Image (tube, helix red, strand yellow):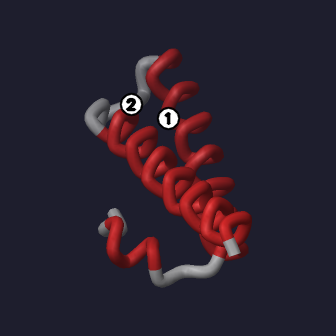
């Protein structure tokens, strides 16, 4: 899991790639939960929070570009 300060150093292309990977992981986790195969149930909220962190950084970058 990346820290917020680490995410601030990445460019928006890499951040968008990370969001896509995490969304795929989230989908897989939900399917595993539905079929009863998920062992680490605590991973689901962690992935959601990580996606939210990345989206926050993306919005901050977008607002910085608009302000300039």
* Quadrant in which residue 38 is drawn: top left
The mark total stands at 2
Residue to which mark 1 is pinned: 29
Q: Residues within 10 Å of mark 2 (few under 14, many from 20)?
A: some
Answer yes or no: do the residues labelled 2 and 1 have beta carbons within 8 Å? Answer: yes
Q: Is residue 21 left or right of residue 49?
A: right
**Quarter of the C terminus within the rendering:** bottom right
Instruction: Find residue 2 and report its horizontal and vertical position in percent.
Output: 35, 68
Q: Nearer the viewer, residue 24 or 63?
A: 63
Residue at the location (60% across, 61% down)?
58
Numbered circle sitting on residue 42: none
Residue that appears at 59% across and 63% down: 18
Residue matched to label 2: 38
Label 1 element class: helix
Q: Nearer the viewer, residue 60 or 48?
A: 60
Percent x, y of residue 31: 57, 26
Label 2 SS: loop
Q: CA distance from mark 2 to mark 1?
A: 7 Å
Which is nearer the eye, 8 or 19? 8
- Of tags 2 and 1, which is closer to the observer? 1
Residue 50 image offset from top left, x and y in percent: 42, 51
Quarter in which the N terminus is drawn: bottom left
């Amino acid at each position: 899991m990346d820290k917020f300060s680490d995410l601030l150093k990445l460019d928006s292309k890499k951040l968008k790639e990370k969001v896509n990977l995490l969304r795929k992981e989230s989908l897989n986790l939900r399917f595993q939960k539905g079929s009863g195969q998920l062992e680490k149930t605590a991973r689901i909220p962690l992935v959601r929070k990580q996606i939210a962190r990345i989206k926050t950084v993306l919005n901050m970058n977008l607002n910085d570009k608009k302000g300039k």
